[in-house]
């Protein structure tokens, strides 16, 4: 077997199994959700790239695999004329790598299109039954249950139920609106689509299975942190309490919902001592070091 399969194999194992095991147990992830989201996203990208590289190395001979590894480590792409001179075996390896990458890419595109169609239908319904309030910058929907949610993407808008207008105070309403606008400006629907599609493509992979649950929650915490730049902790926490029973459409982001209680405790709890960013970087470094023995073993083999 081509010994250059060892580094991508190590990265596949680390990103697919070790990284999610560390992340779901890391307390720092909820303290710095943006860093945790970056680790989840990087883990998914590295897993897909490493799996594609592994597929190519399983087909290529050792000498060609060595040239490919050198090009990747030096970030030096081969010239265009070299691509036109590939052998049949190299073309097969390239096709295998592209096929591996195409699977999650196609799932991501399918999830985006499906969510866009759902949001478009919901936006058309809101145009018929809702009314736009220029002072709030949101669409008001007649409904007794208090709810605040947003539709991201091309159909972007914030929706407030009449029950929420009667229930929430002015600071609470401002906090809920700031939370929803953070989802829209952060384009959080892209990460949700990526996590959902990855979980559907690799349902038994820990990275995909745990990421499909963790990413939406971390996005809600990220929006909470963004809203806290404009409102007080008490205003946001009490708004979440009032909206906890509200439900948003599946294609939307809701300020309340099942995660409201956990996020309330996070907002009102005193900040833990220590350096969560430092602990997060140490977690990432530990995952990276786990692949080091395979990389060293690969380099120790003669070509």
Image (tube, rainbow, N blue to C red):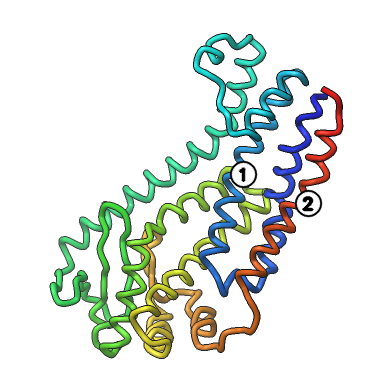
The answer to whether 287 is drawn above or below residue 73 in the figure is: below
How many numbered discs sit on the rendered protein?
Answer: 2
Judge by depth and name the residue closer to the eye, 192 or 125: 192
**Residue 289 relative to residue 160: left or right:** right
In what element is the residue under mark 1? Answer: helix
Quadrant of the image containing the C terminus: top right
User: Which label is found at residue 290?
Assistant: 2
Please provide percent x and percent y for residue 139: 20, 69
**Residue name at image x 70 percent, y 43 percent:** 12
**Residue name at image x 71 percent, y 44 percent:** 11
Please provide percent x and percent y for residue 184: 33, 62
Judge by depth and name the residue closer to the eye, 37 or 119: 37
Cα distance between the residues tagged 1 and 2: 14 Å
Q: Residues within 10 Å of mark 2 (few under 14, many from 20)?
A: some
Please provide percent x and percent y for residue 24: 66, 65
**Residue 121 relative to residue 113: left or right:** left
Q: Residues within 10 Å of mark 1 (few under 14, many from 20)?
A: some
Q: Which residue is mark 1?
A: 46
Judge by depth and name the residue closer to the eye, 162 or 151: 151
User: Which label is found at residue 12?
Assistant: none
The answer to whether 186 is drawn above or below residue 238 in the figure is: above
Please provide percent x and percent y for residue 280: 64, 66
The answer to whether 209 is drawn above or below residue 108 in the figure is: below
In what element is the residue under mark 2? Answer: helix
Quadrant of the image containing the N terminus: top right
**Residue name at image x 71 percent, y 19 percent:** 64
């Amino acid at each position: 077997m081509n010994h250059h399969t060892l580094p991508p194999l190590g990265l596949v194992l680390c990103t697919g199994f070790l990284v999610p095991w560390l992340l779901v147990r890391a307390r720092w992830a909820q303290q710095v959700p943006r860093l945790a989201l970056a680790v989840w996203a990087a883990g998914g990208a590295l897993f897909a790239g490493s799996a594609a590289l592994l597929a190519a190395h399983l087909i290529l001979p050792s000498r060609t695999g060595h040239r490919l590894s050198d090009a990747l480590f030096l970030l030096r792409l081969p010239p265009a004329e070299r691509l036109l001179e590939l052998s049949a075996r190299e073309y097969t390896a390239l096709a295998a790598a592209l096929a591996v990458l195409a699977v999650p890419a196609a799932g991501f595109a399918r999830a985006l299109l499906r969510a866009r169609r759902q949001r478009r239908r919901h936006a058309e319904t809101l145009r018929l039954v809702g009314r736009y309030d220029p002072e709030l910058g949101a669409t008001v929907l007649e409904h007794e249950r208090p709810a605040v949610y947003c539709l991201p993407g091309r159909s972007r808008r914030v929706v407030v139920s009449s029950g929420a207008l009667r229930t929430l105070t002015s600071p609470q309403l401002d906090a809920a609106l700031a939370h929803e606008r953070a989802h829209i400006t952060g384009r959080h629907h892209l990460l949700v689509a990526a996590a959902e599609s990855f979980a559907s493509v690799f349902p038994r992979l820990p990275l995909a299975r745990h990421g499909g649950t963790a990413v939406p929650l971390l996005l809600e915490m990220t929006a909470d942190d963004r809203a806290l730049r404009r409102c007080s902790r008490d205003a946001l926490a009490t708004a979440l309490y009032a909206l906890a029973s509200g439900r948003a459409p599946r294609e939307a982001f809701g300020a309340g919902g099942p995660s409201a209680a956990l996020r309330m405790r996070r907002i009102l709890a005193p900040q833990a001592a220590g350096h969560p960013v430092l602990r997060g970087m140490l977690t990432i470094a530990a995952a990276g070091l786990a692949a080091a023995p395979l990389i060293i073993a690969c380099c120790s083999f003669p070509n």
